[in-house]
Amino acid sequence: MLKNGVLEFNDGSSASYKIFTSSPTFAKNSDLLIFNSGDIITLKVVNTTSENHGFTIDGVLNLGVISPNDSIQQTFTSPPAGVYRFFDPLNFPYNEYLGLSGVMHIKAVNDVTPYFYWDLREHQLSWNASILLGNSPVLNNYEPFYFTINGNSEPDINLDTIARVIGNVGSEVRVIIVNNGLSIHSMHFHGYHAFLLKNSKNIAHEGREKDTFPVYPKEYVVLSFVPDKPGEYPVHDHNLVAVTGGGIYHAGMFTTLLIAP
Amino acid sequence: MRKILLFFFLFSICNYWSQIDYSKLIIGRNIGTHTFHDGLQTRIFGFTETLSAATKIPGPTIYLNSGDSVKLDFWNMSQGAPHTIHLHGLDVNQQNDGVGMFSFEVMHNEHGFYYFKAPHPGTYLYHCHVGSTIHLQAGMYGLIVVRPADGNSLLNWENGESYDREFPLLASEIDTVWHNDTILDHEHDMTMPLYVPATFNPNYFLINGKSGTQLSDIPNHLFALPNEKIYMRLANIGYYGVRFIFPAILEARTVASDGRPLPLEVVNDTIEVLPGERYETFLQLGTENSYPFIVEHFNLNTQVISSSQTIVIETTFSGVETNEKVPFEIFPNPTNGIFDISEMVTENYQIYSLEGKKLKESMESPVSISDFANGSYLLHYKGKTVFIFKD
């Protein structure tokens, strides 16, 4: 269901928001869609709002315009294993900015690697209000004040089992980072270098071993690492303004890897 | 029994300490002054190697040899909030990672010790990780360069590629509003929120702590010899994106990032370095000439370019004998005016200006150029010539 709601931040601030969700309640982020390669998928999008919206899975399908209180359903065979963004293509990029975008992961058959998912976004409250009034704020004036992973900021990111990396020494961990925001983010790993398995913006960069990973708007990366030591290690945007939230250090894009011996 | 336990305790301590290959003192300071190219001054935090040294942005570059067991002795002499040293990209264990909440913070007039193995040769960073959005902006950062295990300063890694000269360039920026005492002298209570200013609008964009004419004017150019192969160590510790844009004639070739060789080297004149990233890029100089290149800082939210500055690699001096390989080294270099030659001084050396004018001839050691203006000079000794950078 495509729902209206409110995104609340830890300092008590809130912003009008929209998500795609199958949950009866309003969540902080659109649902993460996970399927297996070869699955026959039936997708039904119900527009519970009072304005037109759309639903597109990048490179896979486009459901077209969905009128208020209407729905569109489509059955399709899953695309090849990989990461796909889904979003509302209408009123680009504002409907996406308001929350109408998310991540679909098609897992390869027999892929039992543990995956964690980080949907990066930033929020400028005046933008949410302005867009809902029908305005189109200019990107040159974009100055977000809140920074979230899957709709949460620190310390709540570590309570999100989809996001919080928990692993073991010697066991591979994969992290899918999708930037559904408008800013560029530069995610730095403490403790470990990781291999860049996939990079939707720069395929030539795949295979690099790094500790800091740029993730550009509307792009994604897939990282892999095998922890060589136990401990708790931060991962955060190294644009250190983005580790703040509501002007509070480090209530933003900051999580930790928890690696057992 | 107690004597036996004491013996084993002391033995284990001595054994551990005997394994340290390299030990270094780094001091944290919260009182320093930075002067911009337009004369404006602002208060900074930073790191120094001695109590008497002026606090500068960036802090001193730490040179390590791959595989060495390293002990960093961090002495916080800042009289303010605690500090730490985070070893950015060195993949050290949790206890030595420099994140206070997961290991330890170092209070004023206390020492904190970090033990680690120097990793793969390459370019890394260190910075404070306490209130880091404020403390990095204040200036608490520097570069770490890891050499191959044998300490070769003209080879990027074992069985790698050699070069004639390297230039580390560390990008950052300053919003002087963030340098007001009310921001810098913040209360530190981990149970209470630490507020940062509501906006970040940098008004100075730095490379190695310099901006504007501090980068573009002679003698602030980067000096090299004609036809040298240069190794650029490009790093960004700021909160903006940075692009280094080299002229095509320099044949920029990037071979490493974040301390690891790239699977495939990249031939591209523009190298984009986002916060926390490092890249290592070869440049091939030609004959005597000036080789300007551009450094852009851009806003990560808007992608608008906020600053475009010029740096010049200069090979246009003449009249001084030169040599491709330098058999001796001088240290420290850059110097504040006093430096040593790495071998016994047995004959006169000469110091020249870049225009070839002899300024000093002597056998005294250590060498003093304290009365010289800040800038670049050439030291000629036993038929060889090296650059000296006084700042």
Image: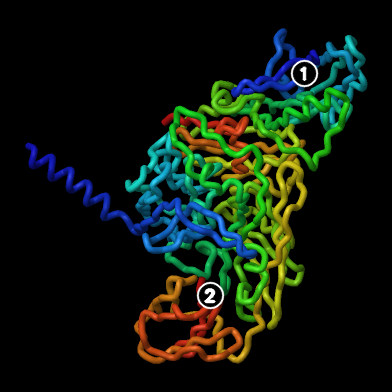
Residue at 56 percent across and 42 percent down: it is B133
Residue at 69 percent across and 16 percent down: it is A27
Number of residues whose C-alpha sits closer than 10 Å to that of mark 1, classed few (under 14), some (14–19) or many (20 or more): many
Q: Is residue B29 above or below residue A239?
A: below
Asked if labels 1 and 2 share a chain, the reply is no
Q: Is residue A241 above or below residue A74?
A: below
Residue B374 numbered mark, or none: 2
Residue B260 versus residue A2: which sits nearer the camera? A2
Kind of element beneath mark 2 = loop
Q: Is residue B12 left or right of residue A92?
A: left
Q: Is residue B231 visible?
A: yes
Observer-side mark, 1 or 2, equals 2
Residue B125 at what x, y percent from top left? Answer: 52, 52
Residue A12 location, quadrant: top right
Residue A125 versus residue A48: which sits nearer the camera? A125
Residue at 72 percent across and 22 percent down: it is A15
Q: Is residue B90 above or below residue A116?
A: below
Kind of element beneath mark 1 = strand
Residue A83 at what x, y percent from top left? Answer: 73, 31
- The residue where tag 1 is placed is A20
| Chain letter for the residue marked with disc 1 in the picture | A
Residue at 92 percent across and 20 percent down: it is A65
Residue B88 numbered mark, or none: none
Which amino acid does the dot numbered 1 rest on?
Phe
Q: Is residue B361 left or right of residue B250?
A: left
The residues tagged by marks 1 and 2 sit, at their Cα atoms, a distance apart of 62 Å
